[in-house]
Image (tube, rainbow, N blue to C red):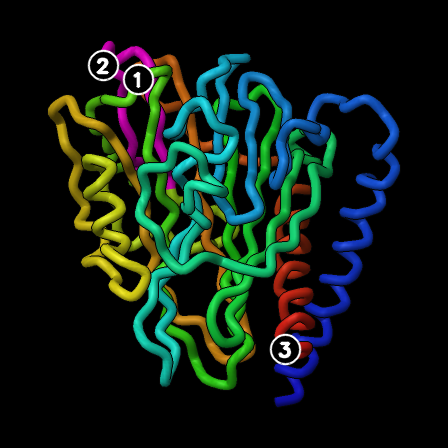
């Protein structure tokens, strides 16, 4: 009991320190022109990391749009929008609460042109960033915190090292309840690879990568579960027609789907993909997972990006900080 209280106190202190560190650079940039990696004034409701070759738009509902090497069309459907059909989805198993599917707010008013399912939406968002300098020791980062049912909070941390063809997405599931929480978490997207809404499925069993080629098979978009920092690999993956991906996550807000089935489609189709983690989060604790999201004009994916040693400490402080702040929010409810 003493160790648990000490951990929660440490997380809270680190969380408040993280928020101060994130907010001060934003205030300092308020009256300046946007530098590389800085906020995009046109990105209403989300934050933008301006890098090369990737520009990453992170919305407050956890959805993500990506532009490659100055392209005006995004790599996620709908390609003309800065908010896209992607993000974090979950089935929390809360005692006494009906089965539900949580995810981004895919209503047409918030996601113009969306073709995704409408689920229960994450709510009460808090977003900070971009912070960092874009180096491997100090990546650009956008931090997002959203609430789910009961005392469940989800933290999302998007990292980008300038010059890389991949960026990193970390999730921290925080359980503010007094009982253990089984939760199924997905990271998924309706792909629009290199300007095309159709493609051929891709899977690398060695890396557990999943994604899609464009029709010409000269541009590849894929996701790889992150196992560095001792994070758990994904339990399942799938690449399929985008409608199948949404159906596997859920057919309605109160109807979880069957989950991903570890397959890809090799014929030409309207591609979507994702990875799935089955997690048990102990009471008053948290668990983290992560995924690399990559865009390549090469035949084979490169080796996984490994940050400089200093980045390991940044990850620990960042995700633990999110958990600490989420604990404060839970106690205020």
Q: CA distance from mark 2 to mark 3?
A: 50 Å
Image height of 6 relative to 173, above or below:
below
Within 10 Å of the Cα at label 1, are there few (<14), some (14-19), or many (20+) other Cα atoms? many
Q: Position of residue 212 (x, y in %)?
A: 27, 26
> Which residue extends farthest left?
267
What residue range appears in magenta?
Answer: 209-224
Q: CA distance from mark 1 to mark 2?
A: 7 Å
Quarter occupied by the C terminus = bottom right
Q: Which mark is residue 120?
A: none
**279 is higher (above) or lower (below) than 113:** below
Which residue is disc 3 drawn over? 333
Is any atom of residue 226 visible in this view? no
Q: Which mark is residue 196?
A: 1
> Could you tell which of marks 2 and 3 lies nearer the N-terminus?
2
Q: Are marks 1 and 2 in contact (CB under 8 Å)?
A: yes
Quarter containing the N terminus: bottom right
Q: Position of residue 142 (x, y in %)?
A: 63, 41
Residue 322 location, quadrant: bottom right
Under circle 3, the secondary element is: loop
């Amino acid at each position: 009991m003493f160790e648990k209280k000490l951990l929660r106190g440490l997380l809270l202190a680190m969380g408040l320190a993280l928020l101060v560190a994130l907010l001060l650079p934003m205030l300092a940039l308020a009256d300046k022109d946007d530098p590389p990696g800085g906020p995009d004034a046109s990105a209403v409701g989300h934050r933008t990391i301006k890098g090369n070759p990737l520009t990453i738009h992170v919305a407050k509902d956890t959805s993500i749009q990506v532009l490659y090497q100055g392209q005006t069309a995004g790599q996620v459907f709908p390609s003309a929008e800065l908010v896209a059909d992607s993000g974090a989805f979950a089935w929390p198993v809360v005692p006494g609460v009906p089965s539900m599917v949580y995810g981004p707010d895919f209503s047409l008013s918030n996601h113009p042109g969306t073709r995704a399912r409408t689920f229960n939406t994450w709510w009460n968002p808090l977003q900070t960033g971009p912070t960092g300098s874009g180096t491997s020791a100090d990546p650009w980062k956008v931090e997002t915190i959203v609430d789910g049912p009961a005392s469940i909070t989800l933290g999302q941390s998007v990292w980008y090292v300038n010059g890389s063809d991949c960026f990193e997405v970390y999730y921290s599931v925080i359980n503010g309840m007094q009982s253990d929480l089984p939760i199924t978490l997905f990271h998924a997207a309706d792909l629009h690879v290199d300007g095309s809404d159709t493609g051929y499925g891709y899977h690398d069993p060695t890396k557990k990568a999943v994604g899609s080629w464009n029709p010409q098979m000269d541009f590849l978009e894929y996701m790889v579960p992150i196992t560095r920092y001792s994070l758990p690999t994904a339990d399942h993956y799938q690449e399929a027609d985008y409608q199948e991906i949404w159906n596997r996550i859920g057919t309605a807000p109160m109807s979880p789907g069957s989950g991903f089935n570890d397959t890809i489609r090799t014929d030409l189709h309207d591609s979507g993909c994702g990875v799935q983690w089955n997690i048990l989060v102990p009471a008053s604790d948290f668990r983290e997972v992560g995924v690399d999201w990559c865009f390549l004009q090469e035949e084979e994916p490169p080796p996984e990006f490994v940050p400089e040693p200093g980045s390991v400490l940044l990850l620990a402080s960042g995700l633990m900080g999110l958990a600490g702040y989420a604990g404060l929010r839970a106690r205020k409810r």
